[in-house]
Every structure is written in C-alpha cells, then in structure tokens.
Image (spheres, rainbow, N blue to C red):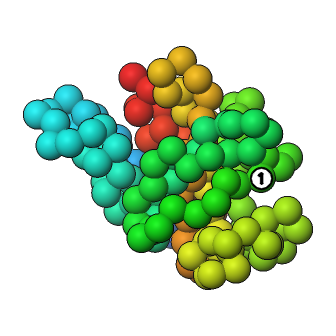
C-alpha cells in the first residue's frame, strides 16, 4: 500500500511538532535546573529552602511546596512554602512510602485517596493534587511535594521535573 503525498506531509508535520514540544520541555527543564543550581551556589539570602522554594514553585507551577520528613509512622512538615499555616502530619501511606524508597509519585486527586481525604490541607482545599520526589536531607530520606489547589494539575512532565530538581537539592 502506497502512502499519498498528503498523508506523508501530515505525518512529517506531526513529527516536527512533537519534536518541537519535546525540545521546548527539555529547554524549560534545563532552565529550571540552572536557576536552582545558581541559587544554591550564589550568596545565600536565607536558608537553602528560602532561596530555592520560590524557584521550584515557579517552574513546577505549584501553589505550595512541602518538605516532609518521616517521624513515628507519619510525615512531619519540616518546611513549607506557599501555605500560611503548616498542616498536621501527613499519613505515611503507600504512595508516600514508595516515594521515600526512591519512586516519583503523582497524586491526581487527593480527595480520592481515602487516607488523605480527611487531612486538614485536603479538606481545606489547599491540596487537591501533588507530585512528590525523594530527597536526601542531611543523610536522611525526605519527600519534596509540590501541590496545587486543582485536581490533576501534575502530569508526567512535572513528575520528571520535580525528580530532577529534587536531586539538585541533595548536591
């Protein structure tokens, strides 16, 4: 079966568009990594968290950013950016446990996760979706969680980006 010239042209244009989208995503990820690296290597204006969290929130399009550390079967809020009052501890459920062991996770809609649906940040509308990456802080495992007020705000691209940026915070 022979393809018609119009079909070949359409396929070529689609391939070109897909390549441009991929290159644009890679460029944005590289810019984010550079900005985080420069902030960490520059003259500190405060703590590393104070210097880096606004950059992370901007590039991840996150309403809030959390640093969660394991503590007695739960996850305690170690640092938070974009939330006026830190919430109660987060439950150490399966998704978070997998994240602590090295897996990147996406929470599409926190209201649909039984163990999270009754958390005050979820009930208050502060957290509807999130993307999480493991991060090593001072020799211990922690979770970097970017959140949004909107369900399903994070996809595979943001998951990849949070993983890359979290790894820079360990360096």
**Image location (x, y in percent) of residue 94:** 85, 46
What quarter of the picture does the C terminus occupy?
top left
Nearer the observer, 18 or 32: 32
How many numbered discs? Answer: 1
Residue beneath label 1, please? 91
Q: Residues within 10 Å of mark 1 (few under 14, many from 20)?
A: some
Whether residue 135 is visible to the viewer of this picture, yes or no, is yes
Residue 23, above or below 147: above
Residue 1, above or below 145: below
Residue drawn 30% across the image and 38% down it: 48
**Image location (x, y in percent) of residue 1:** 83, 65
Whether residue 14 is visible to the viewer of this picture, yes or no, is no
Residue sitting at the far left: 43
Figure quadrant of residue 33: top left
**Image location (x, y in percent) of residue 8:** 61, 68
Residue drawn 53% across the image and 58% down it: 146
């Amino acid at each position: 079966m022979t393809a018609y010239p119009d079909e070949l042209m359409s396929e070529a244009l689609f391939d070109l568009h897909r390549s441009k989208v991929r290159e644009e995503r890679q460029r944005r990820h590289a810019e984010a990594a550079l900005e985080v690296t420069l902030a960490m290597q520059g003259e500190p204006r405060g703590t590393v968290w104070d210097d880096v969290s606004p950059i992370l929130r901007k590039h991840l399009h996150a309403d809030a950013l959390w640093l969660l550390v394991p503590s007695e079967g739960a996850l305690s809020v170690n640092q938070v950016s974009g939330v006026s009052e830190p919430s109660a501890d987060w439950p150490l459920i399966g998704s978070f446990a997998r994240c602590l062991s090295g897996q990147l996770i996406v929470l599409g809609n926190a209201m649909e996760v039984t163990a999270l649906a009754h958390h005050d940040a979820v009930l208050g509308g502060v957290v509807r979706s999130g993307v999480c990456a493991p991060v090593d802080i001072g020799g211990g495992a922690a979770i970097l969680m970017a959140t949004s007020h909107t369900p399903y705000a994070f996809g595979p691209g943001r998951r990849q980006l949070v993983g890359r940026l979290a790894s820079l915070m360990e360096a």
